[in-house]
Image (cartoon, rainbow, N blue to C red):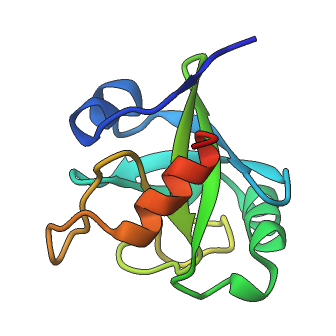
Amino acid sequence: MTRLMCIVKHEDSKIFSKGTVATVIDFDTGISWTVKRTGGSKHADVEPVDSSNTALYKQALGKYFKNWTRHACIVIVKGNRIAASYHGYPHGYDSISNNNLTGHYCIHFKNSRTHCSNKVDGDHQACVRKAAGM
């Protein structure tokens, strides 16, 4: 069994670097899907790798799809299980065509910061703690 990690912002780009594929598991529903990190320097900007994974992402979010509500999740990358938080609002640039999602969404880790305000988001951090069992 792989142990759960809480990584801090400066570690996320080492473990989950741009171009890396990972599995996201929604903490509440148990639904999982595959994403690719397409950018982000203060947190991970990600997109589902294809349309079937976008469907799973939307299923996990249910009524919270296209909503900024934060959700606890586990990110599995390179054998590491990392406590994290994501929201359901796709926005901004779009790197993966034909995945039935326009834009990307954000995954935050311990002490990740938002793009615009450069602040640690309390709601994301609460979800990171929830995913870590704290």
Q: Is 134 or 58 nearer to us in this picture?
A: 134
- The residue positioned 41% from the left and 38% from the top of the image is 19
- Left or right for 111, reference 52: left
Q: Is residue 90 above or below residue 51?
A: below
Which residue is farthest top? 1
- The residue positioned 62% from the left and 46% from the top of the image is 131
- Left or right for 41, reference 30: left
Q: Is residue 94 visible?
A: no
Q: How many marks?
A: 0
Q: Is 126 or 101 nearer to us in this picture?
A: 126
Which residue is farthest front? 134
Q: Is 94 or 1 nearer to us in this picture?
A: 1
Q: Is 48 or 28 nearer to us in this picture?
A: 28
- The residue positioned 54% from the left and 40% from the top of the image is 83
- On the image, the x and y values in percent for residue 101 come to 61, 74
- On the image, the x and y values in percent for residue 82 come to 54, 33
| Image quarter hosting the C terminus | top right
**Image quadrant in which you'd find residue 69:** bottom right
Q: Is residue 45 visible?
A: yes
